[in-house]
Image: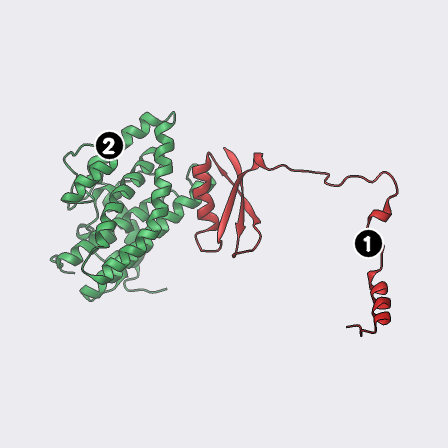
Chain colours: A red, B green
Amino acid sequence: MAVWEVFRQEREGAPFQHGGSLEAPDLAFAEAYAKEFYGRRAESLALWVVPRDSVLEIDEPYVAPVFDRDYRRVDGYSIKVKLKEARERAGTPAH
Amino acid sequence: MSAQAPPRTELLLQLADDELVLGWRDSEWTGIAPFLEEDVAFSSIAQTEIGHARAFYELAAAELDTTADELAFDRRPEEYRCAPLVELNLVHDWAKSVARRWLYETADAIRVDSLKASDWPELAGLAAKIEREEAYHALHAGMWHDRLTRSTARERFATAVDELWPYALGLVEGDQRRILCEAAGREDVPAVERGAHVEDWPALWEEMTMVRRTVPGGSW
C-alpha cells in the first residue's frame, strides 16, 4: 500500500499546506480517504493528494559557501541608517 | 404504535429502518476493518446512515405524534420495516460487507432520486440533502467494487454479490426494481421481500434497544 501526502487549502488564495499523510492502495482510495479526513467538515476549500514517492525530498538544501563571498549577501548592509541619511538630505521627516 | 401507519409514513419507516439497521451493522466493523484508513471511512459512513435514519424518523414522528427515539428503539422487533438485506450479520466477511454496501448504495441512489420528486415538500427537501452525502458513499462503494472485481478475491466478491442480490432487490419496489437490475447489470430474480425478518435480526434488536429497555424513557 502506498503513502499519500495531503495538502489542504483553507480559503481562496491561501497557500496549500501539508495536512498529513494516509495509506491507500491507489488514487481512487486516496481520493476517498482524503475527502473523508480533510473535507468532511468543510474545513478545506481544495486538496492536493500526492504520492509520497513523487515528492523530491532534499536533506541538505543549502549550497555550502566555500569562499568568503559575504558581499553577495544583503544582510550586512544597514539600510536603516542609509535611509535616515537620505531622508535628512531630502528634508522628508522619518516615520 | 399502530400497525396501520398511513402509506407515506410507512415509506418513511422503511427508509429510516433500513438506514438505522445498516448503520448499526456497518458500525460493527469499527476497530476491526482491514486497515486504519478504511476503519475511519467505514465507521463514518455508518454514522452518516444513522444520521439519515434520524432525519426520516423525525419526519415520521411528526406525522405519528411520537419521537424519533421512540420510533427507533421502542418498537417490537416484528414492527420494524427494514429490508432483510440490512439485517444480515456480515461482520468478519469483508467481501460480503462491501458487496452489501455496493448493492445498498446502488438501490438507495434510485430510491433517493425518486424521493426528490415527492409532492411532500419536507421529504423532497430531505432527499436532496441526503443525496449530497450519499454521493460520498457511492464513491466509496464504487471504488471497493472496482478494486475487488479486479483483485485476486474477485471470485469471492462475485459470490458475495450473487448471494446478496435477491436481498438487494427487496430494498425497492415496482419500476425501481427494473432500474436496479439495469444499474447493477443483473437479471431480475425473486426478491427477498420486506416483512419477514432474518434469523440474525432478534439478537441485533436486543442489542440496539437494550439501553432504552433498561431505562424506559431515560435521557442522558
**Residue designated by label 1:** A75
Q: Is residue B64 left or right of residue B104?
A: left
Residue A52 visible somewhere in the drawing = yes
Mark 1 nearby-residue class (10 Å; few <14, some 14–19, many ≥20): few
- Residue A27 screen position, x and y as percent: 46, 37
Q: Residue at x 44, y 38 (%)?
A: A29
B184 displayed left or right of B146: left
Marker disc for residue B163: 2
Cα separation between marks 1 and 2? 74 Å
The N terminus of chain B sits in image quarter = bottom left
Q: Amino acid at mark 1?
A: Asp
Where residue B22 appears, as percent x and y from the top left, is: 29, 46
Give the vertical position of B71 relative to B183 (above or below).
below
Q: Nearer the viewer, mark 1 or mark 2?
A: 1
**Residues indicated by labels 1 and 2 sit on the same polypeptide chain:** no
Kindly give the residue lying farthest to the left in the view shown: B4
Where is residue B109 shown, x and y percent of the image? 27, 46
| Chain containing mark 2 | B
Query: Residue A6 at x, y = what percent?
Result: 53, 44
Residue at x-position 60% and y-position 37%: A55
Residue type beneath disc 2: Glu
The residue that appears at 25% across and 64% down in the rendered structure is B67
- Could you say which is closer to the camera, residue B74 or residue B110? B110
Q: Residue furthest right?
A: A68
Q: Quadrant of residue A31?
A: top left
Please tell me whether residue B123 is drawn above or below residue B95 in the rendered image.
below
